[in-house]
Image: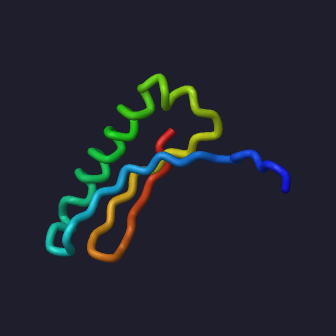
């Protein structure tokens, strides 16, 4: 069997809110995005090639996400 190369690596910051906390979605997404950006500043992470970074917030069972550059 041959060795396959990794095409992408993923960094995901995951947050959860109860449905009753749905008004906090925008602020929570901002916080998750800020956290991803802090991770991306770390040398061991910033050196990774083909890294896809996402902030994900679940409100109940519904997920909301944004790609973080």
Q: Is residue 4 left or right of residue 25?
A: right
Q: Is residue 55 left or right of residue 23?
A: right
For the point 35% across and 32% down, which residue is it? 38
Question: How was the colour assigned to the protein in this rendering?
Answer: rainbow
Q: Is residue 40 left or right of residue 2?
A: left
As drawn, the residue found furthest toward the left would be 20
- Measured as percent of width and height from the top left, residue 48 is found at 58, 32
For the point 27% across and 55% down, which residue is it? 26
Locate the N terminus by quadrant.
bottom right
Viewer-proximal residue among 44 and 57: 44
For the point 28% across and 69% down, which residue is it? 59
Viewer-proximal residue among 19 and 4: 4
- Measured as percent of width and height from the top left, residue 50 is found at 64, 39
Q: How many marks?
A: 0
For the point 63% across and 34% down, which residue is it? 49
As drawn, the residue found furthest toward the right would be 1
């Amino acid at each position: 069997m041959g060795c396959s190369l990794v095409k992408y690596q993923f960094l995901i910051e995951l947050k959860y809110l109860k449905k009753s906390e749905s008004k906090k979605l925008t602020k929570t997404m901002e916080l998750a995005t800020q956290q991803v950006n802090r991770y991306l500043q770390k040398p061991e992470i910033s050196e990774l090639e083909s890294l896809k970074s996402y902030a994900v917030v679940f409100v109940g069972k519904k997920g909301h996400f944004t790609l973080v550059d």
